[in-house]
Image (spheres, coloured by chain):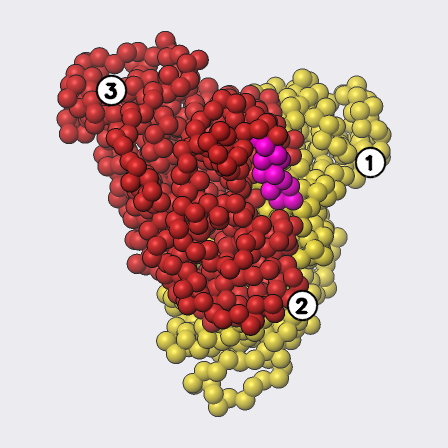
Chain colours: A yellow, B red
Amino acid sequence: MAMRFTLARASTRPQRTQLLNPLAIASCVQHPARPWRRCISTAQSEAATPKPAVKFTSESYPSLKRDSRFAQLTADHVNHFKQLLGSAAVLDAVTDEAVSDEVDGFNSDWMRKYRGHGKLVLKPGSTEQVSQILRYCNQHKLAVVPQGGNTGLVGGSVPVFDEIVINLGRMNQVRHFDDVSGTLVADAGCILEVVDRYLADRGYIFPLDLGAKGSCQIGGNVSTNAGGLRLLRYGSLHGSVLGLEVVLPNGTIVNDLSRLRKNNTGYDLKHLFIGAEGTIGIVTGVSVHCPQRPKAVNVAFLGLESYDKAQQAFREAKGQLSEILSAFELMDGGSQEIVAEVTKNRQPLDDKHPFYCLIETSGSNSEHDSAKLEAFLESVMAKEIVSDGVVAQDETQVKALWGWREGVPECIGHWGGVYKYDVSIPLKEMYQLVEDTELRIREAGLLGDTDDYPVVAVLGYGHMGDANLHLNVGVRRYDERVERVLEPFVYEWIAEREGSISAEHGLGLAKKKYIGYSRDGVMVGLMKQVKQLYDPNGIMNPYKYI
Amino acid sequence: MAMRFTLARASTRPQRTQLLNPLAIASCVQHPARPWRRCISTAQSEAATPKPAVKFTSESYPSLKRDSRFAQLTADHVNHFKQLLGSAAVLDAVTDEAVSDEVDGFNSDWMRKYRGHGKLVLKPGSTEQVSQILRYCNQHKLAVVPQGGNTGLVGGSVPVFDEIVINLGRMNQVRHFDDVSGTLVADAGCILEVVDRYLADRGYIFPLDLGAKGSCQIGGNVSTNAGGLRLLRYGSLHGSVLGLEVVLPNGTIVNDLSRLRKNNTGYDLKHLFIGAEGTIGIVTGVSVHCPQRPKAVNVAFLGLESYDKAQQAFREAKGQLSEILSAFELMDGGSQEIVAEVTKNRQPLDDKHPFYCLIETSGSNSEHDSAKLEAFLESVMAKEIVSDGVVAQDETQVKALWGWREGVPECIGHWGGVYKYDVSIPLKEMYQLVEDTELRIREAGLLGDTDDYPVVAVLGYGHMGDANLHLNVGVRRYDERVERVLEPFVYEWIAEREGSISAEHGLGLAKKKYIGYSRDGVMVGLMKQVKQLYDPNGIMNPYKYI
């Protein structure tokens, strides 16, 4: 059971032995092996009907037109690739309609929101093959989409029209590991979870973790500058990636696979490719500095009266937990009620609170960490910053508490759909966006408890430690009136506060046209210069990014 | 006094009350306010004679010729700048020879190794002024050298010929600090130590520390991607810098001063300017994520039998001290004997050891940290990884122990000069470079105890935690025979092991021609492309870098 930590007004209450129902929620917790495995599926699967085909992106975005600079794929092209890679590494629906369905799987994203018309999937087995593919495509003006685990949220990893998919999945070997320095060098197509297990066996940890770890690939992580759950502790990939191997659109292999933490020898070009979403090259190899794996993990779940108190708690946690603080997640009351409603689980705390925080510590000494966490909790209770809370007593409860955070994105989609915004906002004003958005939707008469209203709830949750808010508007049905109320309102609101319209999900297709809300004309101009420099034919992941 | 930690063979020895002489060494410890203040000065100052003028770089490097693309400075140019900035912000030896000596100070580096022929120093007070200066210089083909605290070690921050010095020292204001997130935004000309004190008052710490903190400026730190003492704990500036304000050579002001930890909106161009050494723009503002300041700092000083044991100790320290390990420094026996000889201080440990390590922990709970350190020390003693050691009992002793590490670079120069190499090498082979170099010099008959031999000692020390070795060859006099034995041998040795010829000091003028040992032709070609893109007239810090 979870141990309720001492608090004056609760001291006379009996401890609940069934405070949490870990098993009920455990299946939706932590890193589903496949990101598209829906964890809160009971209610949905009961009502499940065969899924309709995903709408083509070209239909959802009718203003997008195929770029006529690009050549049309021919049987000659396909034959060239078969000779280059071997037939087994080429999935060809250009000349063989029988594999159309299989190819379609590489055309659609896991959210079933984007779908391209691609006819060819190439699966290179080496950096040299990637180089030969790109050189040929560049010469023949064939557009391509680099694809890792295809777990992105912004439509960046699937074609829009007939771009060739270059899937890195076959390049999945660890090339080198140094168990003194913790430096790992691996192929881009390695699955994040596989690499993390490899490291766990050696006492190390990959400095990145995210829900899709069972499918996503480290090359894709780097190419999208994935943020995730460990950023608060281990920082961004710009800090932990030591080197990259990249193939440029013209086929040039850039060998910058440094295994050194310090290397001040010229412009650090690898950073251009971290977060470039495959628009100026394909990452084929990654060298990363891996930290020591923590031996002890503790999790506390707190109820708070206000967002202001949540900020105070964060400040206190940074001060008191300092080097062992590994996550500080925020969930508003509405988000937790929805998880409870969908999962039918009892919430970790007896009473309702306007805000909840999940705090995780990771360290090398369990006893010390527990002592620090207890002292912290006593202190924030005494200062009346936190109203109530529980601490997980074992790993099952750790997972269960995490489930109340990680279950939100799934549960909010329960009623039909979700408008999702992944944004960064300076902490002081971060949650205000949720309140302002809810007010706006309510005033527009779109939010209510019955089917007359499209909007079910406006929720906020996210990585408070990184000032990264997920604003979710759960709807019964997609409705243009809701969209008009939300956009450009949300983007303007963020721009006024110098926030970011894309904290960790990237631009892809979804946010290409909104970059101006987070970057000024000078910046966008400089970015286009870089794109032009590396990819003058524009073959790399077209229609997206900037 | 320093407490000797328990070790079997030493248990019967009395504890020395005067084991350390903190005051004697303290003055050379930790961050001299001015980097050119020589800390081990007694012997030297006794024999001091007026210093000869620094040799002009153009004489030391006779193959360097002034680039005839650049215009010659005229009185008209100078008048333009005086109108732009006000006369007080212009140090003009073009039309006024009376200030030649003052201008000379901006022409010479603190090592007195490089000296330019510059006649004009501009001290802009705002980003807008920097922009106007650069736009004018670019239009008129006037070459410039951006200059921060001028504490570099590779000749990057002073002119070679008649380049205009643009000194950022007047831009020294903190612009913004968020005490919840720890985000600091400040002018590039802020002194590192001043900023760190500002942060200390608020419970935070700058994620970078280095010996020159009393003089160096954060804009220069960013522009050289300074590494320093806290990298092991807080990572590189690529991870902690959140945003930059940069003026491009054509005067364009790039406002990328994000205060967000997550911001995936396009190519992350700021990284191009981190470590660019002022060759493609001038950093005028910095946004940086600052960690919580540790409350407890402990330092241990260990003696070890071999480099292999030092590696084992590092591995153990990472495992057991993990999140509180903030420094793991290596010093070889020779380096410590030289510090003892020059300072006349008694070494921290009774016996001589081939290697010494300095371990620092920083955390939020003194008791926990001490317990972890003690447990670590007991364990490495029991495993016979460490032969002997002491732990500092108070801040004075912390400084004193650090003195044995930080005093090395000064002491090794005691006999006349030093050939210095700041390199990164994969840990397993790192120290081998020192042994191979010493053998080579000894075999060449250049190393000995009398004046007949130019070389006094070949030493290795450095940031073991970052695989960053400082190879120092102390000499009685500079001698071309020594240079020929050292180069290109050292660079070839490093290249064979995929090390870096410049770990943290940068390229500047000193290493421009050696970049090929750490970067291949493709990489250098891509770098030149970037230089050409941003600075087509080549006015920024010419003759240096790549």
Where residue A202 appears, as percent x and y from the top left, is 70, 55
Tell me how far mark 3 sits from mark 1, CA to CA: 73 Å
Nearest the viewer among B310 and B138 is B310
Which element type, helix, strand or loop, lies under badge 2?
helix
Q: Amino acid at mark 2?
A: Ala
Picture coordinates of residue A396, whole percent (x, y) = 66, 71
Kindly identify the residue that appears in the image at 76 percent across and 21 percent down: A77
- Whole-angstrom CA distance, mark 3 to mark 2, is 71 Å
Say which residue appears at 36% left-offset and 25% top-offset.
B114
Please state the chain letter of the residue tagged with numbered disc 3 in the rendered image. B
- Residue flagged by tag 3: what amino acid is it? Lys
Q: Main secondary structure of the magenta part?
A: helix
Same chain, labels 1 and 2: yes
For label 2, the residue is: A26
Label 1: few (<14), some or many (≥20) within 10 Å?
some
Answer above or below: position of B318 versus A173.
below
| Above/below status of A420 relative to B361 | above
Circle 1 residue: A99
- Name the residue at the top extreme: B68
The amino acid beneath tag 1 is: Val
The chain letter under disc 2 is A
For the residues carrying marks 3 and 2, which lies nearer the camera in this image?
3
| Magenta stretch in the rendered image | B426-442
Q: What subunit carries mark 1?
A: A
Which residue is found at the position 39% from the left and 72% from the top?
A385
* Res A103 → quadrant: top right
Q: Report the side of B309 relative to B460 (left or right).
A: right
Number of the label disc, if any, that sits on residue B119: 3
